[in-house]
Image: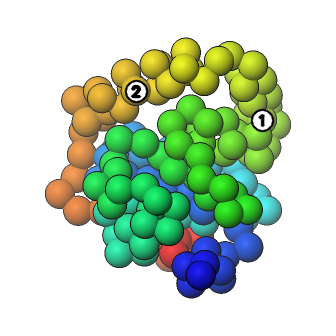
């Protein structure tokens, strides 16, 4: 049975680390470059985020990667990042060309950034509260 959040969403769902400053900034970056409103967001730490992770067979404790759910398929790490950029406005979608780089190599860089993101960008005690303008984009 499909999860109610996935069933209700005709959008691509992006699960982010809700306490990571870099991830919060990337969410705002995506929203500004997604005028069609393709993406909806949820925090990995939220109940909705955990439900979606469980539905995809991923551990609820997953916070070291962005997760993209597109047409029922789950993408993580660099594959998720590339699924996002391919749907953004020009010129950002050109970054999808990095799909030709083997995933193992792309993920080495992704994991290094993920490992250091709190040290470089900081973190909050709680998840970001969306502003009224972008609230409709959050599950």
Q: Quarter of the image containing the N terminus?
A: bottom right
Residue 113 percent location from the top left of the image:
39, 26
Q: From the image, tell me which residue sits under label 1.
A: 93
Q: Is residue 77 above or below residue 15?
A: above
Distance between the alpha carbons at the discs numbered 2 and 1: 22 Å
Residue placed at 72% from the left, 54% from the top?
34
Report helix, strand or loop for mark 2. helix
Q: Which of the two residues, 36 or 49, is positioned nearer the viewer here?
A: 49
- Asked if marks 2 and 1 touch (Cβ < 8 Å), the reply is no
Residue 38 percent location from the top left of the image:
73, 62
> In which quadrant of the rendered view does residue 129 lie?
bottom left
Name the residue at the left extreme.
125
Q: Is residue 18 above or below residue 116?
A: below
Which dot marks residue 111?
Answer: 2
Residue placed at 50% from the left, 68% from the top?
55
- The local crowd at label 1, few if under 14, some if 14 to 19, many if 20 or more residues have their Cα within 10 Å, is some
Residue placed at 34% from the left, 51% from the top?
62
């Amino acid at each position: 049975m499909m999860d109610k959040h996935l069933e209700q969403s005709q959008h691509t769902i992006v699960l982010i680390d809700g306490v990571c400053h870099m991830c919060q900034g990337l969410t705002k970056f995506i929203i500004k470059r997604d005028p069609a409103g393709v993406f909806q967001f949820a925090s990995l730490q939220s109940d909705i985020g955990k439900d979606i992770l469980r539905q995809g067979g991923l551990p609820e404790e997953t916070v070291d990667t962005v997760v993209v759910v597109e047409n029922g398929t789950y993408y993580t790490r660099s594959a998720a990042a590339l699924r996002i950029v391919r749907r953004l406005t020009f010129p950002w979608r050109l970054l999808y060309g990095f799909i030709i780089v083997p995933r193992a190599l792309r993920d080495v860089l992704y994991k290094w950034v993920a490992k250091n993101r709190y040290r470089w960008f900081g973190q909050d005690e709680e998840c970001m509260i969306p502003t009224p303008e972008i609230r409709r984009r959050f599950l």
